[in-house]
Amino acid sequence: MNSERIEEILKNIGAEDTPVDVHKIAENISEDFSKTLTQPRQPGLIVLGDYIMKSRFIKSAVAAVVIIAAGIFFYTTNNIVPAAYALQDTIEAYNSIRWLHIDQSAPVGGQIWTSEFWFECDEYGNVNRMRYQTPYCGDAIGSMAIVGNFDQSQVWLAEHNLHLVGYGNPSSMLGFDITGVDPKVLFERLEQQEDAGQIILDVNETTLKNEPIIVTVTYPAESLSVDWKKAFYIDKATYLVTKSEKFQKRNGKFQLVNTYEFSGYNDEIDPAMFSFDGELPDDITTIDMSGIEAGLEQGHMTDEEVATEITKQFYEAVIAKDFTRAGQLYLAAPGFLVEKAFMGINVIEITSVGQAYPDSDPDSNKMVSLCKLLIEFGDQYYNSDAQMLIYPIDENPRLWIIGGSNVNVSPVSGEIQISKGQADLSKVTYEDLKPGELMQDWLILEPIRIEVRGDTLFPSEETQKQYFDTEQLDVTQFEPVVNFNDKIYEWAVLENEYGVINLTSVYEDWYLITYLWAQIDMPEEKQGTLGIGSDDSVKVWLNGELVHENWIVRGTVIDNDRVPVTFKKGMNQIVIKVQNRGGPWGFCCRLLDE
Amino acid sequence: MKFPGQAEVFQRARAKYMNFLASVLWKLTGDRELFTEAMQYALLGMWQHIGKLDGKKAGSYIYRIALSANTKAWRNRIGRDGQLSRNNFGFEKSPDERLNRDEITMMVRREICQLPAKQAKAIVMRYLEQHDYQTIAGKLSCTEASARSHVSKALATLKSKLATNA
């Protein structure tokens, strides 16, 4: 039969009018169905169950599902042996899947964060019921469990003894589309994306029986997701996905960012898994979130504009300490939880909010908004770069919400002034040093360069350690000039405007050592604690006695190390040695009220 | 977060899509028994995924529901292995025997239900609803060229499948 003939048949079918009695049949079925919805019972599968059993055809379908649950695993055609694997094979294999379990793992800041999903799916690949559980998702939240179906969910935060009910689709709470985790939906999308030329598929199908088919997805050069790659491992016998991995190119190399391992296909999941009944402690606090007006309405704003606006409104609410409003914009979270997440940090001002842009992650529908903030914590100021992830949660009206953020914080540094040729300790004498106040004035020794031995470009670790262990001056007695290795080094007065002392701004070379000297006048003998921050290694002497040393590579954070000391009555000499082992360097020191 | 009452949204969607479903499902089934079954599956699908019928992509999702309902109805009839019980429609067993027009039409319908989702949608939109390619591209969120490609691929698939039976 040729294409023209088929077209003619299709056109004839298209030209057919629907008979009046067929319309009547449709109306009757529809009316019957609607009546079941208005019965005074909880809408849901129970009502659908009543309806299902009215139809002998659907009865048989239900029976088929039960048989599947009893152990019929996979459907394969009897008469067609595909010559090569195609995505459609996996999509069809999932037609018979109703339950699955997924283990997720993702490297986050040197740790592996893990979570688990349990899904009960329908034949569309949509998730009917789900449970998500993670033992840790950040210090502010701790462990989290979510149960839900396609339109409602509830959250259990064990560390907070909190039970939040009345949320909508669990995707909104999780910050990603849970249907995108289901391989059936995922592969349908891949098929569509391949048709549209949005992805490049590579199928590696060896003839070895036990080796999986590996489907690799990459993105064309013009794609926003060009720096991403995905790999799916598919069981040859069943065409089901056993594992998927997602990579992102960083520093020119693809690095693993996420792994999903799929198991428990059609192992019926106990319905109790999809509920918290019987699990929650008796004294748990339950909060109904259904009344929360969550998110920001898009109105006439573009996606970029609404993402920028919601970021701005969120931090404005945080600055105003209106955590209820902030929570409405951030995952529809209760205000006190948002307040807790800030852990006492005060956001002072929004320095800037950049133009938002679409997230390059191929599975993301989020916008990314970059925001610079000035924050205060522990009487000190910091610059904060916040990357906010924003996505739509509802369509009518179109609402957007913040679903996650990555925040980097760096101490604010003021301008440093160096006055050479002034080896005068009286200029760096603290007579009324208040606890918590950073010591901003020091005598600084002209930095000593660590020599490079042999043909290497950088000093060896061993050489650096030797310089750290050996003193280049007499720390018990201040001398106006220092003679080290037949070279004279002079002191200068260092005055820092505020914050930590960023030595890179005045001495930008790597592999340098310097000494800082100051004196503290104490009216009487006193025990106290010095809060020391350093980048990198540090030694501290008080009145000629070594009180602290730390051979380390790190960035300066106020009070990196806390050093208990005893000040004598009168003038106390404090000397700090800072060694730069590469990159920027700096230090800070203050007396703590401990 | 507030979610509108599910039943209310369903009723709105039902009012909006009933004629569409009746028309498309009739054209896809051409058989009152199959139609009845497909219609029931479609209503169930609408109810279970009502959230998706209340948004911007509802116009596209209803096709998915209709096609899935049609596939399930056909699958009950023809079995999961894709093999039609020819006796159901009185097909002659010998491939040499000429099939009459109704039988061929029924075969085309049967094969539509086994097309990949996008191709099936494209065929329904192009021939059963007689949309132009611009409209199809809009509904499928793809370019006009891709819409043409889906229709051509679907025709090629139908041709190949039917060649063995005709």
Image (cartoon, coloured by chain):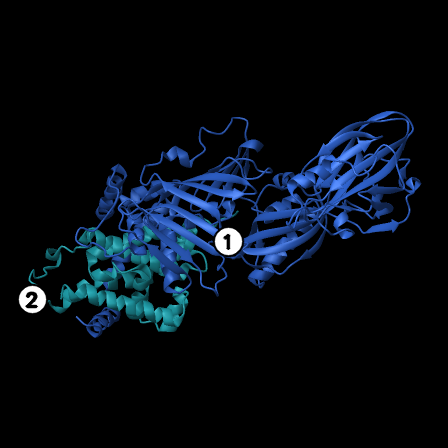
Chain colours: A blue, B cyan
Q: Is residue A427 left or right of residue A16?
A: right
On the rendered structure, is B24 left or right of A390? left
Do badges 2 and 1 share one subunit?
no
On the image, the x and y values in percent for residue A301 come to 58, 63
Residue at (84, 39) in percent of width and height: A517
Give the residue type at disc 1: Lys
Residue type indicated by callout 2 = Asp
* Foreground of the two, A186 or A242: A242
Q: Is residue A329 visible?
A: yes
Q: Nearer the viewer, residue A157 or A247?
A: A247
- In the figure, residue A14 lies in which quadrant? bottom left
Is A281 above or below relative to A583?
Answer: above
Q: SS for tag 1?
A: strand
Measured along the vertical axis of the image, is residue B23 above or below residue A255? below
Asked whether the viewer can see residue B16, the reply is no
Which image quadrant for residue B159? bottom left
* Neighbour tally class for label 1: few under 14, some 14-19, many 20 plus, Cα within 10 Å: few
In the rendered image, which residue does mark 1 sit on? A253
Question: Which one is nearer the viewer's eye here, A7 or A105?
Answer: A105
* Of the pair A17 and A332, the residue shown nearer to us: A332
> Tag 2, which secondary structure?
loop
- The residue under label 2 is B96
Q: Quadrant of residue A47?
A: top left
**Rendered-image quadrant of the C terminus of chain A:** top right
Name the image quarter holding the N terminus of chain A: bottom left
